[in-house]
Image (tube, helix red, strand yellow):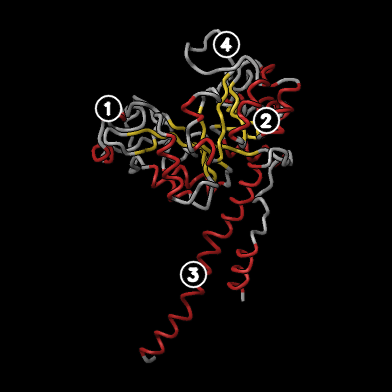
Amino acid sequence: MKPSSLVLLAAMLTPLAACASLQDATLVSNDTLVANERMLRNPMAPGVMVASHRACWKSASENSLDGIRACIAHGIDIIEIDIRTTADGRLVLMHDSTLDRMTNGHGKVSEITFEALRKLRLKPAGGGRDVTTLTDRRVPTLKEALAVAKGRILINMDAKDPAQERIFEMVEQAGMTGQVIMKMSADPDTSELATSRFATKSMFMPVIFACTPKTPAGDFCAAALDPLLARYARYRPIGFELNFGDPAFIGGEAVAEARKHGRLWVNSLKPEQAGGVSDATALADPAGVWGKLIDQGVTIIQTDHPEALLQYLRRQGLHAEGRQFQGPPSRRAERGRCQQ
């Protein structure tokens, strides 16, 4: 075949290959993502959403790129990732303030440079100070995590350092403001929140703790849910993360009113966060844990067992396998051209 013919053939095949790649990697996942975003923004939409704590870490490592990929592969709706700042100001994924549990390093994340951090290796799953097994995984940057998740899965940002504005700036630069949940536990009138950009420009979710005798002095908490709803209205939150040991905190008219304003997020991680139930017994008794929370009005559950929760919800008819969404007209036209 003549060289000119090869060039012509390549020109004809390149758009087809691009279409195939777009369909396989973007359109399918993007449709599901957009449907999930619409569900997140509509508090009265039926169904319950699944959030995976520290990404899907059980078959990977906490807060790792592989953990994010696993959640995408399993069809999880939302990943939660923890963000910290290195000594030289880089935003990285790490839950603990120290390196010891999840890496072969020691000391505080805030006291190590990114170059030194990058030489460390992550431990498998949830790690442990006594765990010596290492993986080939490295501590990822927030930028890397955003790149892996873009167009594929909703992200819940847990800023362990006060870096919400920097995180949101990076989210904006990545073009992912409609994909990322920003959150903070703070009085709605505090200047830190009231003067922020992320609380009004992002999909914002306040974190609300029920006050108890053990609540540390200075921590923001509420004796009741009702009075806070109107005070948070200026931020137009997409939901409320509620942490409570007493189920009465979301009882009565308060929870019904809250559901009109946003979806209710509860962490089934510890009894003190989820009205006395937790992941500890969820696998053996999903109805007694996750089912109980749903009966109380909860519409997003964060868990360390996202696949099991997903299966339970589907058995109950509360989660569609691959949320169906036709996409905006431009996307449908693009797909039609590929199919011609």
Q: CA distance from mark 2 to mark 3?
A: 41 Å
Q: Which residue is mark 3?
A: 18
The x, y position of residue 145, in whole percent, is 42, 45
Quadrant of image for the N terminus? bottom left
Residue at 67% across / 18% down in the picture? 247
Q: Amino acid at mark 3?
A: Ala
Q: Are marks 1 and 4 in contact (CB under 8 Å)?
A: no
Q: CA distance from mark 1 to mark 4?
A: 34 Å
Identify which residue, 207 or 139, lies in the foreground.
207
Q: Is residue 255 above or below residue 64?
A: above
- Asked which secondary structure carries label 4, the reply is loop
Q: Quadrant of residue 5?
A: bottom left
- Residue extending furthest bottom? 2
Q: Which residue is mark 2?
A: 298
The earlier-in-sequence mark between 1 and 4 is: 1
Left or right side of 95 for 16: right
Residue 212's tag is 4
Local packing at callout 4 (Cα closer than 10 Å; few below 14, some 14-19, many 20+) is: few
The earlier-in-sequence mark between 3 and 4 is: 3
Q: Amino acid at mark 4?
A: Thr
Local packing at callout 1 (Cα closer than 10 Å; few below 14, some 14-19, many 20+) is: some
Q: Which residue is mark 1?
A: 106
Q: Is residue 276 above or below residue 325?
A: above
Identify which residue, 255 or 48, lies in the foreground.
255
